[in-house]
């Protein structure tokens, strides 16, 4: 007997959703339909804008040090205040989207972040710039927290890995292009103009996102009452798999950020003595992550996440091992393999959250991303101790330890029963 298939999303009119009223039938967006294309293009542009705005300031840090007479550590605050506020905002915007809807939160987030970036270009003081960057990070949490949930609710389960991979590919391109565009512009124009250009591009991306993203069809409003939020938090941590996925996010992002935080120090020193411009261009290794996020995500759809996640972590370990060698071409190849594995792993783990969480999915995605960014912040800083004590060998030991933990967690996840199997037992 054939299994009934949900009708194509573009064949049905939008179903109005009253708060608190569940739909009788979920209508998924299928791969190959116009709505699938609109959805992935919208989320791709949203991810691009988010990470371009977040990381565009890295090439400008030396300019800020000179213009405002501050040291490198103080200049780095222009990025850290954004990521810090983004992590905090994730705990707010996810539950907020559970109440008022996915698309309204994401649209407001992108427009607010673009406007704050334009505002930061006009600030006359360092404190004013930091304030606007903090607001930018807080605004960006609205898309970062909600995009994964939107995809898990609206895309057919058979295609969620591909859709999530394309969204994460947009993140990678945004992070790379934000650095490259500004890195080139500041050789010809002021940092104020460079920020205006990035803010303007993000404003266009926000408008595209707003116009082409389909409205939610499977969203079910959830109470914002503190008791409801606490119940959701407790439910997620009682699940056998979600806490493991949160831990996976922490160690994977921690390993990734640590490698890219300190690889530049290694290449600037003996025996390479590379210049800063060339080191900056190495962000093009993100291209391997753009490919892998969609490719591995699609592979996980076919083979299952539990069979694919551990393999991507093994790839990261292999890439790390290659970076431990001395020849520069091998170091770059190792970075490519490491990046390929990381974005593949993140694609698989993040799409798993939406399949594992049965309720309060926005809150579950927020917790995943909170641990994700917390891992990058904490491990990225702790890695500095290993760098000062043991150089690149110390970094290799630290990252290797994180990846072994990640591999053990992935193997544990692979042994867990699915939700359907748990319900039958």
Image (spheres, rainbow, N blue to C red):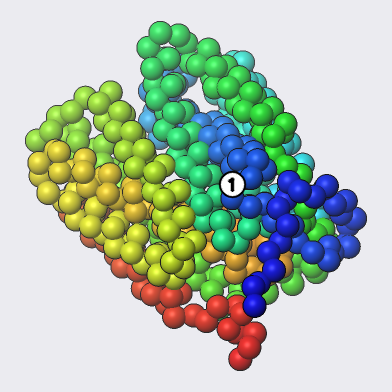
State whether residue 54 appears in this view. no
Residue at image point 45% right, 9% down:
189
Where is residue 311? Give x, y as percent: 33, 64
Q: Quadrant of residue 122?
A: top right
Where is residue 255? Give x, y as percent: 35, 54
| Figure quadrant of the N terminus | bottom right
Q: Is residue 371 left or right of residue 179?
A: right
Name the outermost residue toward the top: 188
Q: Is residue 81 left or right of residue 92?
A: left
Q: Quadrant of residue 60?
A: top left
Where is residue 111? Give x, y as percent: 69, 30
Name the residue beneath numbered marker 1: 32
- The residue carrying pointer 1 sits among few (fewer than 14), some (14 to 19) or many (20 or more) residues within 10 Å by Cα, namely few
Using the image, determine if residue 377 lies above or below residue 310.
above
Front residue (pair 120, 335): 335
Where is residue 93? Give x, y as percent: 70, 49
Residue at image point 45% right, 40% down:
172
Residue at image point 76% right, 48% down:
11
Front residue (pair 210, 224): 210
């Amino acid at each position: 007997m054939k299994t009934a298939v949900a009708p194509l999303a573009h064949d049905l009119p939008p179903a109005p959703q009253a708060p608190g009223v569940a739909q009788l039938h979920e209508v998924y967006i299928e791969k190959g339909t116009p709505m699938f294309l609109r959805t992935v293009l919208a989320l791709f542009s949203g991810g691009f804008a988010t990470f371009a705005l977040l990381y565009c300031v890295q090439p400008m840090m030396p300019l800020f040090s000179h213009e405002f007479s501050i040291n490198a550590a103080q200049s780095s605050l222009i990025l850290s205040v954004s990521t810090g506020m983004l992590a905090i905002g994730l705990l707010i915007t996810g539950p907020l989207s559970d109440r008022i809807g996915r698309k309204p939160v994401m649209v407001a987030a992108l427009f607010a972040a673009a406007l704050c970036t334009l505002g930061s270009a006009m600030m006359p003081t360092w404190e004013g710039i930091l304030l606007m960057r903090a607001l930018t990070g807080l605004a960006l949490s609205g898309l970062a927290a909600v995009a994964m949930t939107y995809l898990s609710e609206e895309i057919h389960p058979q295609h969620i890995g591909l859709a999530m991979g394309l969204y994460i590919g947009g993140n990678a391109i945004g992070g790379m292009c934000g650095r490259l565009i500004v890195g080139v512009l500041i050789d010809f124009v002021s940092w104020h103009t460079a920020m205006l250009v990035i803010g303007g591009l993000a404003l266009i991306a926000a408008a595209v996102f707003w116009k082409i993203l389909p409205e939610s069809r499977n969203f079910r409003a959830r109470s914002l009452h503190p008791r409801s939020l606490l119940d959701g938090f407790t439910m997620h941590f009682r699940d056998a798999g979600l806490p493991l996925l949160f831990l996976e996010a922490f160690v994977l992002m921690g390993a990734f950020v640590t490698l890219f935080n300190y690889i530049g120090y290694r290449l600037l020193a003996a025996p390479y003595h590379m210049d800063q411009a060339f080191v900056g261009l190495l962000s093009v290794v993100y291209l391997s992550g753009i490919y892998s996020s969609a490719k591995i995500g699609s592979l996980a759809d076919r083979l299952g996440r539990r069979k694919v996640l551990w393999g991507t972590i093994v790839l990261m370990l292999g890439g790390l091992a290659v970076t431990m060698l001395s020849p520069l071409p091998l170091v770059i190849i190792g970075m490519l393999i490491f990046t390929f594995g990381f974005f593949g792993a993140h694609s698989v783990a993040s799409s798993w959250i939406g399949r594992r969480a049965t309720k309060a999915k926005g809150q579950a995605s927020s917790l995943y991303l909170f641990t994700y960014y917390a891992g990058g912040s904490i491990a990225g800083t702790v890695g500095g101790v290993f760098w000062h004590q043991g150089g690149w060998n110390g970094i290799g030991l630290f990252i290797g330890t994180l990846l072994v933990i990640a591999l053990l967690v992935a193997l544990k996840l692979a042994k867990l029963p699915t939700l359907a199997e748990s319900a039958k037992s």
